[in-house]
Image (tube, rainbow, N blue to C red):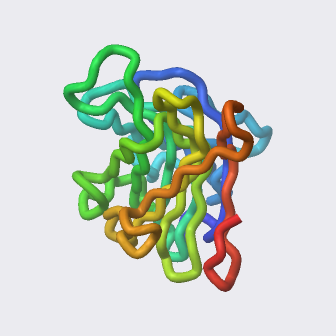
Amino acid sequence: SRFSPGARTRGCRQSRRLRLEPLESREMLNAAPSVYIDVPGRELDTDFGSEGFVSLAVEDQNTFGNDVAIQEDGKIVVVGTTRPPGSGVGTTAMVVMRFGADGSIDTGFGLGGSRIVNAGNVGYGVAIGPDGSIVAVGNGWDISGSSMVIAKLTTAGALDGGFDGDGVVSATFISGRPSTGSDIAVQGDGRIV
C-alpha cells in the first residue's frame, strides 16, 4: 500500500483543482491544492497519478480540499468544499472525494468519485470508521445562523440513512452563536468524537 492506513493530513490553499501529492516515502504529508511540503531527501512519487499529482474538479467547479484520511485498503478520502451544480454564485457545499492508492479517481464512490453533502457548506475534517464508513464534519449556514454538520457515508459514498435517518446531523451548541466542527475521529466502538 502506498500510504499508511489511518494517516491524516490537513491544509489547503485556493486552486481550481484539488491536488494530492504523495512523497516517495509512501506517507501522505500534504493534500493541499497546488502546495506540497518540500522535505529534504524526499521527492514526489511519480508513479502516483500523473507525475506525482492528481486533481479533481467536482462538476467542473472550484473544489478545495481541507482534510485527508487513508482507508485500510490504501484508498484516499478527501473532504472539502465545492460549488454545487446549478447553484448561485457564492453557494458552497461540503464534498467528499475518494481516490485509489495509485491516485486514480474512484468512480465507484458517490457520483463519479465524489459525494456532495448539501446540508454542509464547508467540510473541514474526515475520518474512517472501523466498519469502513466515512464521517465528515464541517459547518452549514441557514437563516438561523451557523451550525456544525456531521455527515456519515457508506463505503460506496452514499449518505448512510441509518445515521439520524438521512445521514446528516446538524447541531448548534449555544443559541445565537455560530457552531462549527473542524476535526473528527471515530472510536473503535464506532462512536464519533
**Is residue 43 at all visible to an observer of this figure?**
no
**Is residue 186 at all visible to an observer of this figure?**
yes
Rendered image quadrant of residue 27: bottom right
Please provide percent x and percent y for residue 116.
34, 45
Please provide percent x and percent y for residue 5.
61, 70
| Of residues 37 and 118, the one drawn nearer to the viewer in this rendering | 118
Q: Residue furthest left?
A: 86
Q: Residue furthest bottom?
A: 189
Check the picture and name the quadrant holding the C terminus: bottom right
Residue 166 relative to residue 40: left or right = left
The residue drawn where x is 47% and y is 63% is 152
The residue drawn where x is 33% and y is 50% is 114
Q: How many marks?
A: 0
| Of residues 172 and 38, the one drawn nearer to the viewer in this rendering | 172
| Of residues 15 and 122, the one drawn nearer to the viewer in this rendering | 122
Please provide percent x and percent y for residue 87.
26, 25
Q: Residue furthest front?
A: 175
Is residue 103 placed above or below 182 in the rendered structure?
Answer: below
The residue drawn where x is 64% and y is 44% is 172
The residue drawn where x is 50% and y is 32% is 141
Q: Residue furthest right?
A: 40
Please provide percent x and percent y for residue 64.
48, 32
Residue 80 relative to residue 42: left or right = left
